[in-house]
Image (cartoon, coloured by chain):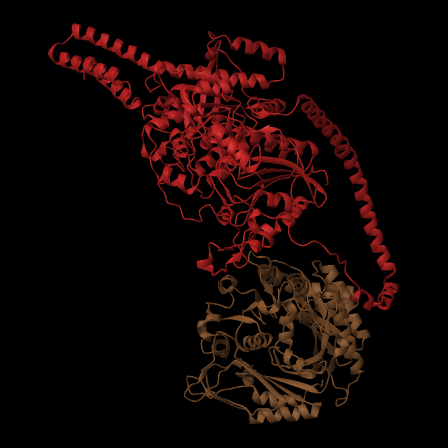
Amino acid sequence: MSEFAKRLHQLSERLSYLRDIFPGKHEEELALLQTRLDEAQAAAENASGEESGAGLEALEDLFFFIECKLEDKLTPMDKVRIVRHPQRICLRDILENVYDNYTEIGGQDEHTIDPAMLIARAYITRKRGGQVYHQPVLVIGHEKGHGEEFRNGGSAKPWGNAKAKHYMGVAETEGIPIHAYVFTPGGYPLEEYPGAAQQIARNIYEMAGLTVPIIAVFSEGGSGGAEAVSLADRRLMLSHGYYSVISPEGAAAIEGRLRNGERASAELVERCAENLHLTAEDNLKFGYIDKIIQEPVLGARPYHYEFFRTLRQEVLRATDEVVLRARGFAPLRAAALHRLHDRELNLDEFYVRWDLSRAARQRLVEMRQNKFIKASHSVCKNNRSVAGRLGDAWSEQWWEIYNRLIYDFYHRNRRTIRNLFEELGSEWDMFKMRLLRTWKRQEAQELAAEEELTSLSEWSEDERGWAWVSEKAREDRAVTCPYAARRGCMDMWAFDLYNEFAGVCSSCGHHFPMEYQWVMNNCFDKDSLYEFNTEVESGNPLRFPGFDEKLAAARKKTGLKSACITFEARLEGIQVVVAILAGSFRGGSVGVAEGAKFVAAADRARRKRCPFIVYCHGTAGIRIQEGTHGVIQMPRCTVAVRRYIEAGGLYLVLYDTKSYGGPVASFLGCAFYQFAIRSSSIGFAGPGVIKNTTGIDVPPNHHNCYHALSRGHIQGVWDRRDVRANLCQAIETMGGRNLYYR
Amino acid sequence: MNIQQHKVLIANRGEIAVRILRACRKLGLDFVCVYTAEDVCSGHVALARELGGESGLYRISSYHDANELLSVADDAGATAVHPGYGFFAEDFRFARRVEERGRKLVFIGPSWRVIRELGDKINTKRLARSLGVPTVPGSDRPIYDEMEAEKVARSLFDYQSQQGIARPVVLVKASAGGGGMGIEEVHDLDLFRQVYRRIRNYAMRQFKDDGVLIEQRIMDFNHLEVQILSDRRGRHPVHFGTRNCSIQSTGRQKRLEVAPGFDPSSVEYRFDAAALLDEIVQHSLKMARKVGYDSVGTWEWVVTRDGQPFLMEVNTRIQVENGVSAAISRVKGQPVDLIAEQIRTALGEPLGYSQSDITFRGVGVEYRLIAEDPDSGFAPWVGDIDRFDWTDAEWLSLHTHVPPVTADAPYTIPTEFDPNLALAIVWGKDLEEAGARGLDFLGHLRLEGHDGRGEPLRSNVEFLKNKTGQMLRF
């Protein structure tokens, strides 16, 4: 093919790309380009050489002009379409062009456990003076490919994430930085071995404490799947990428209340994309990414070689910055950072050592944790007065000091002495027993046996029944167990069922859903509840249309200000901090307010050295109307949890009714001690979503708690009536060493 | 509300339904009767049809279904429910539901709180001990700790050897168990731990509760009962004497009951029987007053050969053998019907007499006529009855739900329920006369039938004849 024909072909490719990105939009411009292109083709057949070449150049200029014009008019949905286009750059292109060489580890092409997750050991060569340095990095990312079927569109399966987690560990051992590329529309929502939510939670938990620099580059960041590899020190984002809680189509399906795979109208999808604020600029404004990498006009495609140079410079700069920030020696670090802001500097000719000392690693993790804890802090609606906040800050400090004194100093030493005395005491008992054996035997026989046998064990006229009884018990009706046909259960009277039976079918043990107040009021010591952080309120940070009314309705219905209730209570005299996700408030979805309350509760439990119990009464996932503000709660709360667990506490999660989505895939799912009340369901995505995204019909027990138990997600299934006893046993027998009562 | 305006739903079948029907009729109350498909030919249906016509009869699918019974009550406009015995008689949830639902009914029986308090054997035992009523030695609450369990077992063995018992035995039971499941005997303290662990693990598996009860095993005892009646105020319960229900089948089902409990005038005991009967009656009345007992009920006792009484449990219902207590009792010189008294007091009438108005005379014997095979472990016999005749006498009263049968119109025993046929109550002025009249009755009884394979009917008549001589003895 001649040079001329090639250029002509390229132009027609560009035109079809435009048509793909703007379906049914900008028809005039596209028609113009089409006629010009047809003319040029006709001309090329007739004439040849110089003049048609000149005509072609003019046509190319026209193409470029119109592309620039359309670039200015890009809507968020257009960007989503750009990102999804098969011609978009993929991770393989980046590996080929940004890094100097790489070895794919953890599989090759389709010969791997999950082709959607690509792990490579790559290196970057830098020169300073005559010296050549090879700097190794671990590249982790989703591989979308250019339309290959087996890549599954970059949607990583749970075992793909498990693979990523494994190699993160390798990178930590070797001490090399991680570059994570996020090219995923979302995690693959199947509950297998392991389950999707379970594995994503493990990944986030792992990354929250990983002691090597992590740089994440977002192109397509779809909710949970993206979070599985993106809890990073620096988050870069390609200018045409998106980072969102849910795909615009998914949001439209929820907004439009569509069921059974109906399709939302293009208009609604467009509007939802706009309302979700998912573009790079929006996310930079919110502070959830640190920098935007400018792409070529209408998105980067594999032949934009100049762009790969930029990308290389940016990831180098980010890695250097992170490393230098963590370094101990402040003056040098500041100077180096200052120089790095100079755009003219070619980072290939500059050298920063990427390995870190032990102290620097700790500092790195701490900085990363602080970064996420502080994220979304400013959007949180907290009505607490200034004086109240000051008081809170003061009491927090006071607990810290008090607990240091009492538990770290006093108790530790006291324990040593007490242990010594216990040892001595049992020695003495043994000695006494031997000495007095004969005499004891006589004494025992003389003991009046009858007295003891007929005396009364402590008899109290204790109040029977539950302290809190559901409203549902007041109805005079019979309730049928859903399993009556299969297991032959008798109908129960609502009064008995919701009062005395605690919502448990008396013949088959099926647990009917109960209100969150049941556990709140029946499982902790009487009158020991003290609610804190009551002023935090769910808001509408994205000004999502129509959401204010919905929030007001939820507030009125439940009397709550947010779906999260945090309080301190006592269990058999032991002080515990409890967070409840109430399923009745907007389906228990997690947004900024819930995240803030959760983080504050974890912090409080850490400072007071109490067990931290989370009762997930039900959650539908991340609140989509809060967009990325909601998604960021996943890493944020997980970081808080990791801090708490590493401080030596007991973090225990108890699921009830239905728990799905982001919270389960992060701060709930990462707990070492997770239990479920019987007849609850736990999973990543509900059956409807699975059907829509993967086309698989899951069996009805797919999310059942027993299924989750056999998957290893949860550690046990509890009867609702035993929750109190089991919690008491748990706080006595589980958890770390730093609990105050230990 | 005058009690005559009440309408009683009879939520039971068979013999007790017949007796409740009669009692209602005697008191002038309207009633509603229910029956299932298996019971179409039963005598209680025929009697209800005869007395009340078709309108008071409802066909239901199961006597166990509370929803159906209550919708019948609403439909028929009933204002009270009599549960009889069995089915819902001791179900405090049913009693509570009846009393607290939207359309309230009167539960003819104790209030649900009393049923709950006394329905739990462990609770009853603790309550009894708190009043100084003797109970079976052992723990009065579930024990969860091995050391503690062993301590209790050791003191039980010591206690029994102090009492001069040659082979002391301790019972280990799962506290959540019942019906003979999870019970074992221990003869030797050294084996106790093994047995304890086995029972505890069994209980944990079966009942999800590893609490264990440890009690002395009482050997060689008589089973006595005290019949109590009280009105709704519950202040002044009266008793209708004692009964001796020691003659039982192998499955510990009563077959022959005698009132009074002991008869020192014709049988010799090792202890002062009259004083003992008085003691258990007084203990029972004390407990009834304490809980505010407000209906008929039975306090069950075991009495050892040495004359030691232990309270076993309380039955918060009318019992099968209530007739035998009524047979020996006179209120102000008049015969008494305990079922009618129960209905009357439950609907709010005061008792109207006190203990001093109740007099006792003679001996009553109740025979339970059951289609069963005493030779093969009292297995129920099922088939058709074509002859059931007896000679009437003024000292005999016989309650049955079997309709009059001939060879052409036999009665088929339903397989769904127990094969109880009739209760015969015989009265005599002393034990000897009562025994002789009992044998006379059994001798003239003609009970014949066959099952589908041509096998003749089997019943416990011979068994009852044999046992008549052993009444009131150890």
According to the colouring, which chain is red?
Answer: A
Residue B219 can be seen in this image: no
Task: Please give left or right for residue A574 compared with residue A237 in the image.
Answer: right
Q: Is residue B87 above or below residue A170?
A: below
Residue A16: x and y in percent read 25, 21
Place residue B339 in its image quadrant.
bottom right
Task: Please give left or right for residue A56 compared with residue B367 in the image.
Answer: left
Image quadrant where one finds the N terminus of chain A: top left
Q: Is residue A313 above or below residue B263?
A: above
Task: Please give left or right for residue B45 compared with residue A723 in the image.
Answer: left
Identify the residue shown where x is 44% and y is 85%. Answer: B410
Q: Is residue B431 above or below residue A93?
A: below
Residue A263: x and y in percent read 33, 34
Residue nearest the observer in this picture, B413 or A276: B413
Place residue A457 in its image quadrant.
bottom right
Residue A131: x and y in percent read 49, 12
As drawn, which residue projects farthest toward the left?
A46
Image quadrant where one finds the C terminus of chain A: top right
Color used for chain B? brown
Place residue A32 in its image quadrant.
top left
Residue B18: x and y in percent read 54, 77
